[in-house]
Amino acid sequence: MTTERELLERALGSDQPPVSLDFEAIEAEGARVVRRRTRLALAGTAVAVILVGLGATALLTRGTPQVVTPTAPGQVTTVAPFEREIAYCYRTADITSSEPNQHVAFGISGAGGDGRGDAAAAGVQICKTAWAEDYYQWQQPGLPRVVPPLVACVLTPAVVDIDRAAVGAVGVFPGDGTTCAAMGLPVAKI
């Protein structure tokens, strides 16, 4: 039976070169690899911590309603709406009513990547069309259709029967700037 050593000698020949290893060079290369991996791991950890922090900040601040300060009744002020994807048409200048069809929410499609449009900017025109075509049966039956003067107000938390995410959206009411002020709402600066 042949031993492993005999097999090795047959494969390499009897005059095999002496094997010598430079252990110091091998250890130095290993140390460099370990340092490189440690630096990469630290950098990766730092990037991960930053991304998690940014993601948490985005999640915690997304959907947080901004504050619309109600105005003093009778004081006309203007505020730019910050919720622009939804708006409301109102039948009457009343923010406390929860009657059916008192208000109708709408949004519009747009050219943005998400398909949403600026309902705040188009609100008055959309509500004029709704009144003119009597989409919501707000006109008096048997009488000629009349489109009342309309005003865009910025909705505050005092408004009844709307989605809380719609605070800061436009509500279009029959009336003028003093109508918004009488309800304690700012006029929408569009």
Image (cartoon, rainbow, N blue to C red):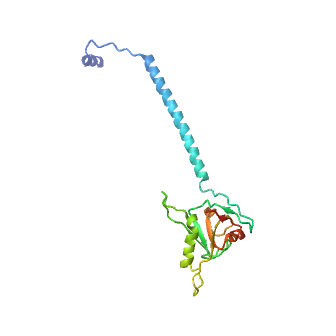
Q: Is residue 178 left or right of residue 6?
A: right
Where residue 146 sits, quadrant-wise, is bottom right
Quadrant where the N terminus is found in the figure: top left
Image quadrant where residue 159 sits: bottom right
Residue 148 in percent (x, y) is at: 62, 77
Q: Reply above or below: 99 against 111.
A: below
Percent x, y of residue 60: 61, 51
69 on left or right of 17: right
Where residue 6 appears, x then y in whole percent?
Answer: 27, 17
| Quarter containing the C terminus | bottom right
Using the rendered view, name the quadrant where residue 118 is placed: bottom right
Q: Measured from the top left, where is residue 18 in percent x and y?
A: 33, 12
Q: Nearer the viewer, residue 63 or 106?
A: 106
| Tag count | 0
Above or below: residue 50 compared with residue 137: above
Residue 157 vs residue 27: left or right?
Answer: right
Is 78 or 68 nearer to us in this picture? 78
